[in-house]
Amino acid sequence: MKASNFKLFGILMVMTVFTLTTTSCSSDDGPTVNIVENEGPNGDIGGDFTGNGGDGTRTITWTNNLATADYNADITSSATGTLLMKVADANGTVVLERSLNGGTEPDSFSGVTSSGEPGNWTVTITLTSFNGDGSYSLSAGD
């Protein structure tokens, strides 16, 4: 009788371990985004971003010695999700807040920010449920 209880216990333990290992494994293949910053000539900045349905934000400090900045952003025409570009001047005042929604036109924007205080500006790139790729750039304005 004791041998059969031990055998039954062993079978239950093997089944429990098997069940836990096959049902508790997590997947690392969930939605992600990648936002890259590149510094260009003359202190310009820009970068690329990609995503497979994920969310993410990157904030970059950028020295702008002028009161405005020229900006540009685009996403692939087949992209889904949202890109938000937000730029604040050295005083923290928002001088640009523009977004692009995937799957709709336009798929790019460009222009000149509002006038702000020269110095260390912050550029925040936010991707929400973003699937696709794109790029952004900023350079000191006039």
Image: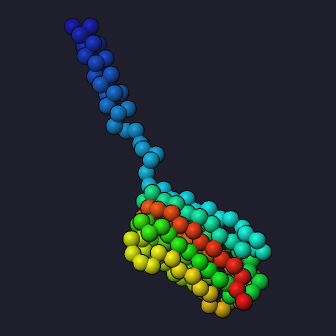
Q: What is the quadrant of the C terminus in the image?
A: bottom right
- Residue 1 at least partly seen: yes
Residue at 25% over, 16% down: 8
Residue 26 screen position, x and y as percent: 41, 42
As drawn, 7 above or below 74: above
Residue 49 screen position, x and y as percent: 55, 63
Residue 117 screen position, x and y as percent: 71, 88
Q: Is 8 or 138 nearer to us in this picture?
A: 138
Number of numbered discs overlaid on the protein picture: 0
> Residue most toward the bottom?
115
Residue 88 screen position, x and y as percent: 63, 82
Q: What is the quadrant of the N terminus in the image?
A: top left
- Residue 84 at least partly seen: no
Q: Is 26 or 95 nearer to us in this picture?
A: 95
Report the colour scheme. rainbow
Q: Is residue 30 left or right of residue 50?
A: left
As drawn, 105 above or below 81: below
Residue at 48% over, 67% down: 76
In the rendered image, which quarter is residue 129 located in? bottom left
Q: Is residue 35 left or right of residue 8?
A: right
As drawn, 92 above or below 83: below
Residue at 72% over, 74% down: 44
> Residue most toward the left?
1
In the rendered image, which quarter is residue 141 located in? bottom right
